[in-house]
Image (tube, grey):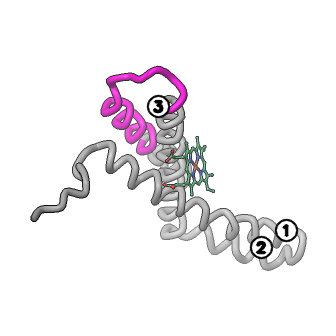
């Protein structure tokens, strides 16, 4: 007997995976980000040392990855909100592609300014 779980290799499935992974990554990043910002009040010298460390190329690359995930999550989230609250639109694949393109473009713009 074959158990079919569902159509997995479809742009909408990968959009779902990207939305979940990006949402979780952002949720993990946020408390760390707030903790580092709080150093400005608690321990300014430690914040300065941390900010100097963030100038390294690996950290910049990781930041670019996070920026891409945030842009992808925002574009994907707006597509999902439109899907839920506006009349149905056939062009979901095109909207997913536009969202992915937007995320890559935002990441490249960040990198142009980062190095
Ligand atoms: C930038 C604007 C954002 C928009 C427009 C947005 C939109 C959405 C939407 C519509 C959903 C529900 C998806 C569904 O129906 O399955 C969602 C899920 C989620 N979002 Fe956001 N979001 C944004 C920013 C963020 C941020 C900043 C974080 C974390 C700090 C975040 C974390 C999450 C998580 C963890 C989920 C659950 C993912 C899942 O269950 O697959 N989002 N978001």
The answer to whether mark 2 and mark 1 are in CB contact below 8 A is yes
Of the image marks 1 and 3, the number of the one nearer the N terminus: 1
Nearest-to-viewer mark from 1 and 3: 3
Task: Give x and y (percent) for residue 42.
Answer: 89, 75
Q: Is residue 81 left or right of residue 42?
A: left
Q: Quadrant of the N terminus?
A: bottom left
Q: Nearer the viewer, mark 3 or mark 2?
A: 3
Residue occupied by mark 1: 40
Q: What separation in Å lies between label 2 and label 1 (alpha carbons)?
A: 6 Å
From this viewpoint, which residue is outermost toward the left?
Answer: 1
Q: Which residues are magenta?
A: 83-104
Q: Residues within 10 Å of mark 2 (few under 14, many from 20)?
A: some
The residue at which mark 3 appears reads as 83
Q: Earlier in the sequence, mark 2 or mark 1?
A: 1
Cα distance between the residues tagged 1 and 3: 41 Å
Q: Residues within 10 Å of mark 3 (few under 14, many from 20)?
A: few
How many marks can you see? Answer: 3
Q: Secondary structure at mark 1?
A: helix
Residue 92 lies in the magenta stretch: yes
Q: Residue at x 41, y 23 (%)?
A: 88
| Rendered position, 53 above or below 70 | below
Check disc 3 and report its element: helix, strand or loop: helix
Magenta-colored segment: predominant secondary structure: helix
Q: Residues within 10 Å of mark 1 (few under 14, many from 20)?
A: few
Of residues 12 and 50, the one drawn nearer to the viewer in this rendering: 12
The residue positioned 74% from the left and 70% from the top of the image is 36
The answer to which quarter of the image holds residue 102 is top left
Measured Cα–Cα span from mark 3 to mark 2: 42 Å
Residue carrying label 2: 47
Which residue is located at x 53 percent, y 56 percent?
23
Q: Does the magenta-highlighted stretch encompass residue 90?
A: yes
């Amino acid at each position: 007997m074959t158990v079919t779980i569902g159509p997995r290799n479809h742009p909408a499935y990968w959009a779902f995976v990207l939305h979940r992974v990006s949402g979780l990554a952002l949720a993990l990043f946020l408390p760390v980000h707030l903790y580092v910002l709080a150093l400005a009040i608690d321990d300014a010298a430690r914040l300065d040392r941390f900010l100097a460390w963030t100038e390294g190329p690996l950290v910049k690359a990781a930041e670019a990855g996070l920026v891409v995930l945030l842009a992808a999550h925002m574009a994907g989230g707006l597509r999902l909100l439109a899907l839920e609250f506006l009349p149905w639109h056939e062009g979901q694949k095109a909207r997913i592609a536009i969202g992915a393109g937007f995320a890559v473009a935002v990441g490249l713009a960040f990198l142009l300014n980062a190095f």
